[in-house]
Amino acid sequence: MASRPAELEEAARPARRSSGGSAPPLRRGSVGQRPLWVVYMALFWRLSAADSEFSILDEAQVLATQMRKLATEELGVVTMQRIFNSFVYTEKISNGESEVQQLAKKIREKFNRYLDVVNRNKHVVEASYTAHLTSPLTAIQDCCTIPPSMMEFDGNFNTNVSRTISCDRLSTTVNSRAFNPGRDLNSVLADNLKSNPGIKWQYFSSEEGIFTVFPAHKFRCKGNYEHRSRPVYVSTVRPQSKHIVVIVDHGASVTETQLQIAKDASQVILNSIDEHDKISVLTVADTVRTCSLDQCYKTFLSPATSETKRKMSTFVSNIKSSDSPTQHAAGFQKAFQLIRNTNNSTKLQANTDMVIIYLSAGITSRDSSEDGKKTTLRVINEENGFLNNSVMILTYALMNEGVTGLKELAFLRDLAEQNSAKYGVPDRTALPVIKGSMMVLNQLSNLETTVGRFYTNLPNHMVDEAVFSLPFSDEMGDGLIMTVSKPCYFGNLLLGIVGVDVNLAYILEDVTYYQDSLASYTFLIDNKGYTLMHPSLTRPYLLSEPPLHTDIIHYENIPKFELVRQNILSLPLGSQLITVPVNSSLSWHVNKLREIGKEAYNVSYAWKMVQDTSFILCIVVIQPEIPVRQLKNLNTVPSSKLLYHRLDLLGQPNACLHFKQLATLESPTVMLSAGSFSSPYEHLSQPETKRMVEHYTAYLSDNTRLIANPGLKFSVRNEVMATSHVTDEWMTQMEMSSLNSYIVRRYIATPNGVLRIYPGSLMDKAFDPTRRQWYLHAVANPGLITFTGPYLDVGGAGYVVTISHTVHSSSSQKSSGHSVAVMGIDFTLRYFYKVLMDLLPVCNQDEGNKIRCFIMEDRGYLVAHPTLIDPKGHAPVEQQHITHKEPLVANDILNHPNFVKKNLCNSFSDRTVQRFYKFNTSLTGDLTNLVHGSHCSKYRLTRIPGTNAFVGIVNETCDSLAFCACSMVDRLCLNCHRMEQNECECPCECPLEVNECTGNLTNAESRNPSCEVHQEPMTIIAVDPSLQDALPQCINTRCNQRMESRDCFGVLDCEWCMVDSDGKTHLDRSYCAPQKECFGGIVGAKSPYVDDMGAIGDEVIALNMIKSAPVGPVAGGIMGCIMVLVLAVYAYRHQIHRRSHQHMSPLAAQEMSVRMSNLENERDERDDDSHEDRGISKYEAVTLSLQVGKTMG
């Protein structure tokens, strides 16, 4: 490599005065000036010959040496492990039974605080009504007329509010003398808010139609507001479960106007019920139809979960008028059948109300009018008799443009009152019927006030108990909330309900951030088994939509858990131990194993019902018989400076910008994530002050143990002090390392969320290092150098690749369960391709890219590949898989038994089945072409020892054809009904088929484990624009002074600009410039970063969707010409696959017998909305990832 300019040598110093420069050459040899065809033929022979001097195993060892050097010298893994070896540990046996009682007590105390608030508000309302009888309380404070000057923005509510007054929204039915205690409530509600963290909205919703909310807020100002048809109100005043069948008449006698009224009324009913109720919607004309979006809807009622209501709502929206007369009897026959089937399949709860709601014009066929009516009443009489006359019927007459016949009204009234005797139908039982009511609807009807109040016909048992809702989105502010509510009475008169909305993140903080030991975790469910919080769910603080209602059995999908679940739901307190085979384990179990190598491990479940609530807490301990090691008290390193990450509060004199982050080179900074605090929600919801930061710093630096704990968990100080030992090594490397121009940052994180990072940087308080992929991947690969990425760095450094490594409590105990920290270092994406070119001469001798080298991690995602650095390939990009970029290699390695396995997991947050690859990191030896006929391309692939990564070399000497099935427009799999282990397809997803009526999965999908938690969104704190202009960059790599590509390639914030702004034309003279000038090597290319750097948003998502299209640069004309050939080859390969699979592999003596063809047996009948239809016909833009005469560059 040519010597660098003297000014670049000077630039290698890591101060703000500029840092940069190129690393010294890593190259072990050079290639002479030979014709390219000689190079191709020589490499082809070397890749093909078994006795060749060329060995990819040797090349992999060279790479492994370099990776160990990075981990040891640049990151300091060996030093930190030696330090952790020297610490003194205590050993603790986790006791789930005692821990669950303590944690349940904490959660109960929280709920009790809110129950106290609800009871206090209830008593004030009831007392105010007594006063109202003598001195009417009727003053209205309309929410929509409050002057803006009276309100200010409040972060807890995320909107403008007034914390001193309440305000009202009115229903259309409210009269001027209606009881309104709002002004009497103001002082009480304000006191509640001051003394109770986590409270959001408090309200009183009156039976007369006044909705009073505190704090005052401009809420729903368009039109009137009817809270009495909301699920919270309905479930509080009628807490009993309701089984409801809605029948919509769409026969020939129903006009379009009437049908629209019926459809709108059905939507109102759906919006008024919750998951404790069960629902079905039928349409009736000449035949009866049910919602086809779930097969179970044809047979049973379904719990009214958000997913069922969404599907039913879609069904209702698509109802069309029919030309056939209405068969009323058939509709009621089906409705009763659904109710009876549901009652027979599940244990009916006491006081369950069963209701049929009929929306109809009431017109029968002219030819058999009286017979039709009699038949309908006979069906009702007989069917209800089978159910002991326990079903009520409510009818709503659809008025025909202001005129409705008296006969039709009389018929609908007879249906509601079940007057079968009037039509000569004898009673089948002596039990009395429950008479319903008939109501007329027209275009002027307020459906929320009429149909939405259907429940007033049901018996009021006057249950004076608190009702706890499941999580839902806050329609007045943002985030997820739960409501605690109670009815208010004056004697037997229902006044309304009082409610308190509680921030879900606060209620669940003790469960979300539970970290008693590395061996345990916890989850919270309700008394039906619905999951509120589990380790595989995203933290509530970051959610805006509630998770889909999912039973805990789907998350804890291991043998014997079904019996555990039954005991959890039936016993208020208990524990149970089960033994789980390792091959059936869950990922979050494996990551907690302290003793490995056994065929099975023990799991302990301990649970307790949270008193006075409907929730159950469970603590799970993995291998409870094996102790967990915990640090004893440590002292801080005398030379170490503790600098908290809030540089904006501390006024750091040597602050600078590290790309888009406020930073400093003076010292690493310490960030304490929410899991480090005893009250995580309080930390997240309240602004940090300089005084608080000073308190943290004093406590964490105090070796005397005299300074009071400012609210941190007990073990946090030890973790801060333990990680301080890496500071000196990092600072030294920043001064001395030749790789500073390629390193973005170094960091170390601990299980309790302590993060130490260099350069010291200001972080967003919601950041949790333990939920990042680099942390989770390292814990899943203990003792290995673990690659993660590439991904777009939120701090502004562009695309980066992370290598991370676990630190253990002892060098001799390198299992996941003994991981006490994870260290990580971010490199620029191009650095690892530079390593390939420098260390593997064969990778750097071909300008035509017929010879391609790559590094991929153990899930098949590429870390280094020519297309990731090719400007014309729309690179660099994230989540590029080997099936996208090297379909020939991907097709072949799937035929190597025991090397790669396609896996499945169920993602309940978005109801998908994820298909992904897992490569065997125990591979010894190398892989080469297995399938005959690949004469144009040869490859070799082997593991990089000591890492989770593999290196591969591909040589193409002529055009070849290979493909993997991929969707170009989304992640949908091409065929969701079967998965062949050795058929190439990109990582993809299928809809998860959940039986909405039972919550069960199909047999095939029920065997899949639950997926790990999704990657959380990440943000940084926006730096004041004035500071951005005033502060220098921490590291100035002087891109404009780098005259050669090799001095620019992979350097921080630098791009080698090669392509003009049209994305096609090569520049006459390439040059080095900052990323913002030519991102990805294209002049003027739009940066994927959003201006002012908030969350990485839609712009980046759209960009990545474009960049990840697997077709590559194949022209449309070529695509059209070869598509028929491609499909023919695909069909041919499919037919001969089993025969070609018989080839032997150097990996094993026999074929791997992992085949998952027909995940579900081929179904004899397929519904219109089957996965296959959704996967092919509905998404026509499905493509194949092609490699046709591929040239890179």
Image: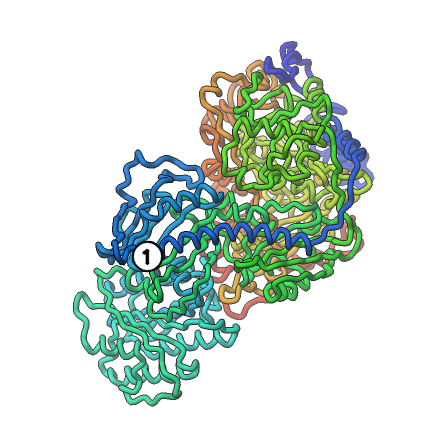
Residue 830 in view (yes/no): no
Residue 922: give x, y in percent of width and height: 76, 45
Q: What sort of colour scheme is used for the picture? A: rainbow
Q: Position of residue 545 (x, y in %)?
A: 46, 49
Above-or-below relation of 1068 to 915: above
Residue drawn where x is 48% and y is 56% of the image: 470
For residue 577, side relative to residue 230 (left or right): right
Q: Quadrant of residue 701?
A: top right
Tell me: 405 left or right of 892: left
Amino acid type at circle 1 is Ser
Quadrant where the C terminus is found in the figure: top right
Furthest-top residue in this view: 6
Choose between 700 and 227: the one closer to the eye.
700
Q: Position of residue 627 (x, y in %)?
A: 77, 48
Who's the residue at 73% across and 59% down the image? Answer: 581
Residue 254 lies in what quarter of the image? bottom left
* Residue 367 location (% of width, % of height): 23, 83
| Quarter in which the N terminus is drawn | top right
Res 836 seen here = yes
Return the residue at label 1. Answer: 206
Relative to 723, does residue 667 appear above or below in the rendering?
above
